[in-house]
Image: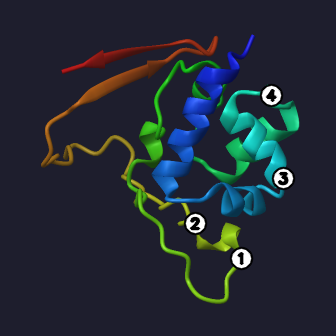
Amino acid sequence: MVNSLDFAKRLKKILDYYGLSATVFSETIDFNRSTISHLLSGRNKPSLEFVMKVVQKFPEVELYWLLNGKGVFPAEENKTTSPTLQKPENTTPAESFPKKQKTPDLEPFSSEIPKIQADIERIVIFYKDGSFKTYEN
């Protein structure tokens, strides 16, 4: 069962991450502004339709994290996108979000291992049953 107050904290974290007001957020996911207000206050629990729209419009939001706080935000695979967004002029809110960047394909069974400049912060292993394990440095 979704805890309304905890859900409200996660929703606020999404708004802060993207630098969105509740009004712009409601326009982006095509949802009533009053619904967003009630969710942010912890008054209401989210509907399935609301949750699905958030997950579809914001690829960095993981479903399990949004619903019950398990997992990470932003999602690891999309960490290359900019956390601060500025809306270009003459665009709708949905058009102002960055597109997922395509990574270059590596030749299969390449003997050369790409060199990583940054230290590893976290390793996440996902299992077919939907569970996962996180190993942090």
Q: Position of residue 54 (x, y in %)?
A: 71, 45
Sequence-first disc among 1 and 2:
1
User: Which residue is rendered at x = 84% and y = 53% of the image?
Assistant: 31
- Front in this rendered view, residue 123 or 52: 52
User: Which residue is rendered at x = 68% and y = 70% of the image?
Assistant: 93
Depth check, mark 3 against mark 4: the one in front is: 4
Please state which amino acid type lies under the numbered disc 1: Thr
In the image, taking residue 122 as reference, residue 66 lies left or right, namely right
Q: Position of residue 110 (x, y in %)?
A: 28, 45
Please state which amino acid type lies under the numbered disc 2: Phe
Cβ atoms at labels 1 and 4 below 8 Å apart? no
How crowded pointer 4 is (Cα within 10 Å; few <14, some 14-19, many 20+) is rated as some
Residue marked by disc 2: 97
Please state which amino acid type lies under the numbered disc 3: Phe
Quadrant holding the N terminus: top right
User: Which residue is rendered at x = 20% and y = 48% of the image?
Assistant: 114
Residue marked by disc 3: 31
Depth check, mark 1 against mark 3: the one in front is: 3
Sequence-first disc among 3 and 4:
3
Residue marked by disc 1: 92
User: Which secondary structure, mark 3?
Assistant: loop
How are the residues colored? Answer: rainbow
**Gap in angstroms between the C-alphas marked 4 and 2:** 27 Å
Depth check, mark 2 against mark 3: the one in front is: 3
**Gap in angstroms between the C-alphas marked 3 and 4:** 14 Å
Residue marked by disc 4: 44
**Gap in angstroms between the C-alphas marked 2 and 3:** 17 Å
Does 119 sit above or below residue 19? above
Q: Is residue 62 visible?
A: no
Rendering quarter of residue 11: top right
Q: Is residue 6 visible?
A: yes
Does 22 sit above or below residue 132? below
